[in-house]
Amino acid sequence: MSFGQSGSPASAKQVQYLLSLVQKAGHASFRDARGALGLTQRQASGKFGRDEISALIDRLLAGDDGHEQGEGAGLAGAFAGMGERISAADRLQNERAELLRGMPAELLAAELERRGWPVVAPPETP
């Protein structure tokens, strides 16, 4: 494991897949996409942890709605506002919020109840 990398390294297939998504979004390489994606210097050289690469792949896929809106369309939605530097704490909070949006409501409610929070289902709309 290299310095600054948590967990096990990403596989070569994951790195190639991420590179193909980055290129589809209109960038030549990780280094070229560094500012748009908010990559670290280590990541810009193609070195990722499994968790890091999974999060980046998910973001790129979430931003790609299948419509060809021009070069970089997939990155625009997935990384809106990421061009400017944000703190690691803000980035972590954003990643957690994005992860929670994809969770089924029943799973979130069960976890809140397990933690002692009262949960009430929203009223059904006709």
Image (cartoon, helix red, strand yellow):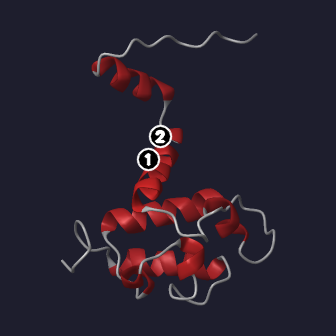
Q: Quadrant of the N terminus?
A: bottom left
Q: What residue lies at 36% left-to-right and 16% top-to-bottom?
A: 117
Element assignment for label 2 = helix
Q: What residue lies at 49% left-to-right and 75% top-to-bottom?
A: 18
Picture layout, residue 65 above or below residue 46: above
Picture layout, residue 79 above or below residue 35: above
Where is residue 28? Give x, y as percent. Answer: 60, 90
Where is residue 77? Give x, y as percent. Answer: 68, 60
Q: Quadrant of the C terminus?
A: top right
Q: Is residue 33 left or right of residue 13?
A: right
Q: What residue lies at 49% left-to-right and 65% top-to-bottom?
A: 57
The mark total stands at: 2
Where is residue 67? Give x, y as percent. Answer: 78, 63
The residue labelled by disc 1 is 96
- Work out whether residue 67 or residue 35 is closer to the camera in this orientation and state it: 35
Q: Is residue 4 left or right of residue 81?
A: left
Q: Is residue 19 left or right of residue 47?
A: right
Q: Quadrant of residue 13?
A: bottom left
- Work out whether residue 41 or residue 1 is closer to the camera in this orientation and state it: 41
Tell me the kind of residue under disc 1: Arg
Q: Residues within 10 Å of mark 1 (few under 14, many from 20)?
A: few
Tell me the kind of residue under disc 2: Leu
Q: Residues within 10 Å of mark 2 (few under 14, many from 20)?
A: few
Q: Nearer the viewer, mark 1 or mark 2?
A: 1
Q: Are marks 1 and 2 in contact (CB under 8 Å)?
A: yes
Picture layout, residue 18 above or below residue 6: below
Q: What residue lies at 42% left-to-right and 78% top-to-bottom?
A: 40
Element assignment for label 1 = helix
The residue labelled by disc 2 is 100
Q: Quadrant of residue 45?
A: bottom left
- Work out whether residue 42 or residue 122 is closer to the camera in this orientation and state it: 42
